[in-house]
Structures are given as C-alpha cells and as structure tokens.
Image (cartoon, rainbow, N blue to C red):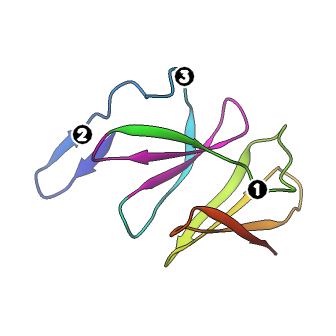
C-alpha cells in the first residue's frame, strides 16, 4: 500500500509478482521511485516498481549471512545501505544506478 496525501487515497499494489507471501519491513525509496524492502519471512531484499507493480528479489551482498533477515535499510542519493543480521555486522553499500553491491563498511 501507499498513501497519496494530496489525493487523500491509498494505492493497493495487489498480490506480489514473486508468487509467495512477503512480509516487508525496513523500506527505502530510491531517487528513481523504486521501492526497496527487507523481507521478514526469509532473508532477502526485494524491489518494487510502483509503476508496473512488479516485485524483483535482489541478490544479497557477498558476506551477508543468508540465514538472517535484514535490519537496516537507507538510501542516500544513488547509494543504498543495508545491514543483515541482528548482531554487529558490515553495512553493505549498493550503487542504485547499477544495482550492484560495491562496498561493505
């Protein structure tokens, strides 16, 4: 769902195109309008294109624990920062123009 404060209405993006239940938390919006979210039912990261309503499961960064969910997600300019796991761990950096993981800090 999204809320349009000008129109005072919700948009329902309907069933996801991945074909399985998604519990999304920790969302961030990129400058191009794409919405990224951390999955809560299984470790992962998804992207929603609000125009086409298509969901895409993203590749986890090298070094991220594939058995734990993400906990932090933020966008600054064309960089997205994500941390996976509930213990102190690396903050992974994605270049949103290429959708490639470029660093871990």
Spatial separation of the CA atoms under disc 2 and disc 3: 19 Å
* Within-10-Å neighbours for mark 3: few <14, some 14–19, many 20+: few
Residue 17, image quadrant: top left
Label 2 vs 3, first from the N-terminus: 2
Q: Residue at x 14, y 49 (%)?
A: 8
Q: Residue at x 39, y 24 (%)?
A: 15
Range of the magenta residues? 34-52
What x and y, as percent, mark residue 58? 61, 46
What x and y, as percent, mark residue 66? 82, 41
Q: Residue at x 83, y 50 (%)?
A: 86
* Within-10-Å neighbours for mark 1: few <14, some 14–19, many 20+: some
Residue at the bottom extreme of this rendering: 77
Q: Which mark is residue 11?
A: 2
Can you say whether 89 is above or below 49 in the image?
A: below
Spatial separation of the CA atoms under disc 3 and disc 1: 22 Å
Spatial separation of the CA atoms under disc 2 and disc 1: 31 Å
**Badge 2 element:** strand
Residue at the front extreme of this rendering: 98
What x and y, as percent, mark residue 52? 30, 41
* Direction from residue 98 to residue 32 in the image, left or right: left
Q: Which residue is mark 3?
A: 21
Q: Which mark is residue 61?
A: 1
| Residue 38: in magenta span | yes
Label 3 vs 1, first from the N-terminus: 3
Closest to the camera, between mark 3 and mark 1, is 1
Closest to the camera, between mark 2 and mark 1, is 1
């Amino acid at each position: 769902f999204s809320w349009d404060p000008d129109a005072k209405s919700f948009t329902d993006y309907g069933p996801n195109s991945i074909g399985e239940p998604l519990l999304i938390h920790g969302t961030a919006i990129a400058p191009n309008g794409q919405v990224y979210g951390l999955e809560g039912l299984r470790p992962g990261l998804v992207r929603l294109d609000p125009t086409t309503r298509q969901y895409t499961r993203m590749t986890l960064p090298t070094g991220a624990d594939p058995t734990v969910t993400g906990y932090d997600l933020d966008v600054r300019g064309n960089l997205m920062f994500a941390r996976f796991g509930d213990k102190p761990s690396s903050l992974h950096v994605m270049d949103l123009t290429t959708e490639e993981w470029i660093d871990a800090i």
